[in-house]
Amino acid sequence: MRIIAGSHRGKKLYEYHTPQTRPTTDRVKENVFNVLVNYLDLTQVKVLDLFAGTGAYGIECLSRGALFVHFNDHDAAAVQVIKRNLGTTWHNCRVTLGDWTTAIKGDYDLIFIDPPYASDLGTQAINALPRGLIVFETDREFKHPAIFLTKHYGRAWVYFLKKE
């Protein structure tokens, strides 16, 4: 797992594996960002990386110049991996350990939702968010009126939603 583009292109990231987690592959992440650059100027966004795991999505945003990234996960070991991946490089971010319902209370332009597969947490988070461009990664088909693009990569489904 590595950073795909930006100021830290090629930097390897520490991984974190549990039965409930699976890091987003470089291929999926690269394709997600190839879509996002058509909809957002990544240097002008505030980002929420929800169920952040290793922080790969948010760190990719920082490398590409995001204004601010909030990383949130409910797993203390995952939060430690995020902090290790951030190192002393970036300071325009916050890492929190806790429930997703608290993290979504900020004002974000881009939200990554990558909850444990086989959970309903992603749907709950999407429905609770008031606005933003949302990237939702899951292991199953999903329907929502705000979806404007769907991508399928092996076991992963990636949905792009716009809530205004």
Image (cartoon, rainbow, N blue to C red):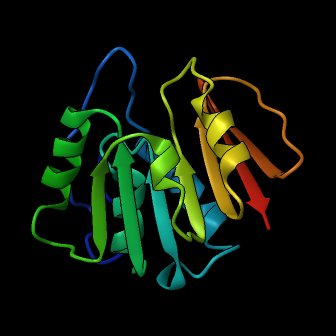
Which is more toward the observer, 73 or 58? 73
Residue lying furthest bottom:
44
Residue appearing at x 53%, y 60% in the figure: 105
Q: Is residue 155 above or below residue 127?
A: above
Which is more toward the observer, 124 or 41? 124
- Residue 146 x, y percent position in the rendering: 84, 52
Residue appearing at x 36%, y 55% in the figure: 71
Whether residue 2 appears in this view of the structure is no
Whether residue 80 appears in this view of the structure is yes
- How many marks can you see? 0
- Residue 66 x, y percent position in the rendering: 43, 77
Residue appearing at x 71%, y 64% in the figure: 131
Q: Is residue 70 above or below residue 14?
A: below
Q: Quadrant of the C terminus?
A: bottom right
Residue appearing at x 69%, y 23% in the figure: 140
Q: Quadrant of the N terminus?
A: top left
Q: Is residue 140 above or below residue 19?
A: below
Does residue 41 appear left or right of residue 70 in this picture? right
Which is more toward the observer, 79 or 22? 79
- Residue 81 x, y percent position in the rendering: 19, 43
Q: Quadrant of residue 9?
A: bottom left
- Residue 35 x, y percent position in the rendering: 66, 62
Residue lying furthest left:
88
Does residue 54 appear left or right of residue 58 in this picture? left
Residue lying furthest right:
145
